[in-house]
Image (spheres, rainbow, N blue to C red):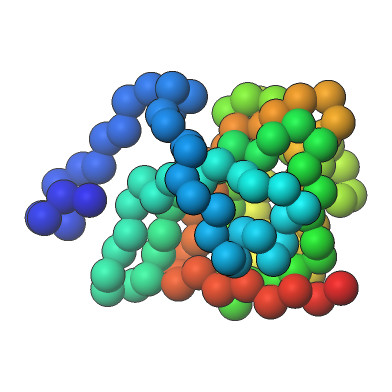
Amino acid sequence: MPADLNEPVVVDGLAALDLAAPQEATAAAVYDQPIGIRVLFEDPTSGEEHYLVRYPQGVRGRAHRHTAAHTMVVLEGQLDIGSRVVGPGSYVHFPGQTSMRHQATADGPCLFVLIFHGPFDVEIVD
């Protein structure tokens, strides 16, 4: 993140970024296998956080909710959001406090940008 928050944040080549981050305890509580995740941006004032996430093929998620709304933009693969499956170029927005389950399909991995519109938290609801 740049020292000056008035400067643009540019990350080229998202699909090629290394997402071999260690499995965080939060992700381990939600998913049945490790996921790839990398922070792209954090706003210390609002708590907003942006991530690049790769779900491995067939990863299964538990039902959960977040205090803040969040948005997902699918770059590669198929994302199962419970009520339907969406593919590359899709935009998905979940209002805060909405119970949800999202995961990759059995057909392959899924790469997406995840934007939390406030500080990240998670509550398992199933």
Q: Where's residue 102, x and y in %?
A: 76, 51
Q: Where's residue 77, x and y in %?
A: 70, 26
4 is higher (above) or lower (below) than 124: above
Residue farthest front in this picture: 22
Count every numbered label the image shows and give the total: 0
Please give the name of the residue rendered at 63% of the width and 72% of the height, measured from the top-left corner: 122
Residue farthest left in this picture: 4
Please give the name of the residue rendered at 64% of the width and 47% of the height, measured from the top-left corner: 34
Residue 85 is drawn in which quadrant?
Answer: top right
Please give the name of the residue rendered at 81% of the width and 49% of the height, measured from the top-left corner: 60
* Residue 90 appears in the picture as rendered: no
Q: Quadrant of the C terminus?
A: bottom right
Is 57 in front, or is 111? Answer: 57
Q: Is residue 100 left or right of residue 88?
A: right
Is 24 in front, or is 118? Answer: 24
Is 32 in front, or is 112? Answer: 32
Q: Is residue 38 left or right of residue 77?
A: left
Q: Is residue 15 left or right of residue 4?
A: right
47 is higher (above) or lower (below) than 85: below
22 is higher (above) or lower (below) than 119: above
Residue 91 is drawn in which quadrant?
Answer: top right
98 is higher (above) or lower (below) than 90: below
Q: Where's residue 100, x and y in %?
A: 78, 62
Please give the name of the residue rendered at 76% of the width and 38% of the height, measured from the top-left corner: 104
Q: Where's residue 84, x and y in %?
A: 87, 42
* Residue 36 appears in the picture as rendered: yes
Q: Is residue 33 left or right of residue 83?
A: left
